Amino acid sequence: MSSCTTSFSTKVSPTFRKNDIFLKKQMLGTISFSSKKDSYLGFTAQTSSQTDFVSAMDEDCKLELKSNYISDGYCKELEIAVRAVHMACLLCQRVQENLLSETSEHVHSKEDDSPVTIADWSVQAIVSWVLSEAYGSNVSIVAEEDVEALSKASAAGLLEAVVRTVNECLADAPRFGLKGPGTDLDAKAVLEAISRCSLAGARGSKFWVLDPVDGTLGFVRGDQYAIALALIEDGEPVLGVLGCPNYPMKKEWLSYQNGYRRILSRLSSSTSESSDRGSVLYARKGGGRAWMQPLLRGESKFVWPNAAREIRVSSIDNPALATFCEPVEKANSSHSFTAGLAHSVGLRNQPLRVYSMVKYAAIARGDAEIYMKFARAGYKEKIWDHAAGVLIIEEAGGVVTDAGGQPLDFSKGEYLEGLDRGIIACAGAKLHETIIGAVDASWNSSSL
């Protein structure tokens, strides 16, 4: 049995830099961890310098093992992951505002023509740096982006923007209870943090998997996107965190367009409930619960559990009353098949088409009941596009399998190999069984 204890040191003077978005009150301290075991989820026991990486921001920030928010089995991992994703969300909000307010030259295309921005590289660098500080430089992280484009001489301006964005974010680390690097990272250190994430790690028995900006197309359009981080053990997600910077805490805000929500958010005070613009969802395997926290506003500090509230899937099991999610993009999924399938089971509501893994958040929070993803021929699903969302739905009471009813296998590398036709996530077992049956009945007549 592990235990978490909190210790505190004196705070230092607040500092403010002209280019910082937030006032940073650097209140230093430590959360110390002890365990009777020599290893922790495959990571060796940490030295005191690594253990001291998490700093206590306030005396109210005390982790109680009997708390409903977190299990002692994943105490350290989950807390660090949630804090890192919170940091990444605010980084993305700042970058997205800049993208929408001016013409940006910092949006590039990958080989598959999907966009990548300075936020993708910056988030990967931030999360990689945080995890390596917590668990050592040999921590295994699998992530989507590489440094090839950033390392070219012609990309000097782009790299400079990434380095600046990373350092602005890390300067805010104390607000989230994490110690920053002390001095700004140079370009070499940022590139090393990004490249520390390797696809080779996906063959290991334990590794972190990160999608720095899932739904980059939604990101550059001012719409929904997500930062997704999960810990994989023996082919299964055991910890999942979804940062959704544009997904509101209040369900009624979903009826407004994202642009309108952004305007209202700017007009609202930082303490107003109506200013809850974004959120972070998280869960751990076997906990039977999933949680949702609001993002920080203004100069507020992260104090665990940060106003977290439990979320549950919808109780609707009648297809006629259910709402289903599907991807916005048609390039990698078949809208025609899902539309026909929806009709065959009697779904009457219009589909909720959402960018990114926010679809998983919608199911987990009870905003929709069904998510179906049937890829077009030749497309292979990647593990970072699903790991965190799958676990969060399951712990919130939902069911996620392939179209054959089998659990998704995250042990075969960067792709979900052996996937039977597609992915089906439902709010409950009865609804899931209905959809699986409809897929079997419709599949042979489709031209997918």
Image (tube, grey):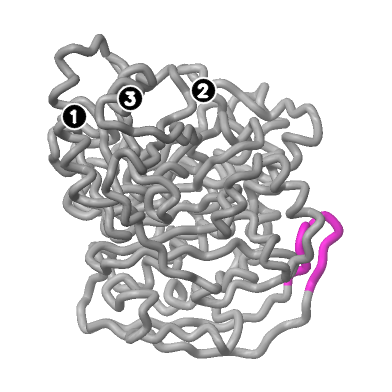
The x and y percentages for residue 118 are: 63, 37
Q: Nearer the viewer, residue 115 or 130?
A: 115
**In magenta stretch: residue 16:** yes
The x and y percentages for residue 142 are: 36, 43
Secondary element under disc 1, as helix, strand or loop, is: helix
> Which residue is depicted at the point 73% across and 75% down?
25
Figure check: 421 above or below 40: above
Which portion, as a residue range, is magenta? 15-24
Cα distance in 3D space between marks 1 and 3: 11 Å
Marks 1/3 in contact by CB < 8 Å: the verdict is no
Quarter of the image for residue 99 reads top right
2 vs 3, front mark: 3
- Can residue 320 be seen here? The reply is yes
Of labels 2 and 1, earlier in sequence is 2
The amino acid marked with disc number 3 is Thr
Mark 2 — residue? Answer: 114
- Can residue 135 be seen here? The reply is no
Q: Nearer the viewer, residue 429 or 242?
A: 429
Mark 1 — residue? Answer: 438
> Which residue is depicted at the point 26% across and 37% down?
424
Label 1 neighbour load within 10 Å: few <14, some 14-19, many 20+: some
The amino acid marked with disc number 2 is Ser
* Circle on res. 338: 3
